[in-house]
């Protein structure tokens, strides 16, 4: 079972040293794509975004979303200090897993949507691995549509939710809501800032929220 804290300990240390300096500048215009497919070595920007340095093109994995790099989730399991939840750096963890999944292989992306200049979305593979499906499999991304073009994505996500892999085992703010509310989006963002956002959340996307509602209000009787 892929638990968030276990993943963080195994993969993350050292992966958060990237951050804003990883972000590319001077992105190419859409006209430079030239075809519906792009192949090459990539830099992983976050858990859903790839940078093809040879073409100077940024591509987002189609139909999925993941935590932004500065975003925190929280493990609901008890820890040594019962007053606080253990923070899980879900954004950095998603980036680390995507980077590990690709390894040294070239990536091929079939461009499927072009929302705007320098904003491409594609179905991307490293070898035989569908990268969006892999991120859904380990629970480090979620679908952004109720009707994915690949039905396997929906089944993959439901298996991850049922097994409580990755972020599905945590309290985490929905990514779009986080982007709307988070003022500080630097890599120095402290977990307490996201605890505050969770306290005024508008949606509850992961199973631990439902668990909390089912808990008795008092435990002393």
Image (cartoon, rainbow, N blue to C red):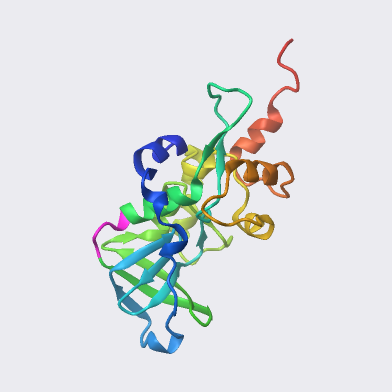
From the image, give the main secondary structure of the stretch colored magenta. loop
In which quadrant is the C terminus drawn?
top right
x and y, in percent, of residue 199 in the image: 72, 41
Q: In the picture shown, does residue 108 fall above or below 165? A: below
**Residue pictured at 57% horizontal, 49% vertical:** 189
Residue 194, image quadrant: top right
Q: Viewer-proximal residue, 172 or 36?
A: 172
x and y, in percent, of residue 89 in the image: 49, 45
In which quadrant is the N terminus drawn?
top left
Q: In the picture shown, does residue 154 fall above or below 9? A: below
Residue 185, image quadrant: bottom right
Q: In the picture shown, does residue 215 fall above or below 89? A: above
**Residue pictured at 59% horizontal, 60% vertical:** 146
* Horizontal side, residue 218 vs residue 32: left or right: right
Residue 23 falls within the magenta-colored stretch: no
x and y, in percent, of residue 127 in the image: 26, 63
Task: Determine the residue located farthest toward the left in the rendered image.
Answer: 104
Residue 97 in sight here = yes
Q: Viewer-proximal residue, 152 or 30?
A: 30
Residue 1 in sight here = no
Which residues, given as a range, are shown in magenta? 101-105
Q: Viewer-proximal residue, 21 or 152?
A: 21
Task: Determine the residue located farthest toward the top in the rendered image.
Answer: 221
**Residue pictured at 47% horizontal, 44% vertical:** 160
Q: In the picture shown, does residue 211 fall above or below 147? A: above
**Residue pictured at 57% horizontal, 62% vertical:** 145
* Horizontal side, residue 172 vs residue 219: left or right: left
x and y, in percent, of residue 173 in the image: 63, 48
Residue 99, image quadrant: bottom left
């Amino acid at each position: 079972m892929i638990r968030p804290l276990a993943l963080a300990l195994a993969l993350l240390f050292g992966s958060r040293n990237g951050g804003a300096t990883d972000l590319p500048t001077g992105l190419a215009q859409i006209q430079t794509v030239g075809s519906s497919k792009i192949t090459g070595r990539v830099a992983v920007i976050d858990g859903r975004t790839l940078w093809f340095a040879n073409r100077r093109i940024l591509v987002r994995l189609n139909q999925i979303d993941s935590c932004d790099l500065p975003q925190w989730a929280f493990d609901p399991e008890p820890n040594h200090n019962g007053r606080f939840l253990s923070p899980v750096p879900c954004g950095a963890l998603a980036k680390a897993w995507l980077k590990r999944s690709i390894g040294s292989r070239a990536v091929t992306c079939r461009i499927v949507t072009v929302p705007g200049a320098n904003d491409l979305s594609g179905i991307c593979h490293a070898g035989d691995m569908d990268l969006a499906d892999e991120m859904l499999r380990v629970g480090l991304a979620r679908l952004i549509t109720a009707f994915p073009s690949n039905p396997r994505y929906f089944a993959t996500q439901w298996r991850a939710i049922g097994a409580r892999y990755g972020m599905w085992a945590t309290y985490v703010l929905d990514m779009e809501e986080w982007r709307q509310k988070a003022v500080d989006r630097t890599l120095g963002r402290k977990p307490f800032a996201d605890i505050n956002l969770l306290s005024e959340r508008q949606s509850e996307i992961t199973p631990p929220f439902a668990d909390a509602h089912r808990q008795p209000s008092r435990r002393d009787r």
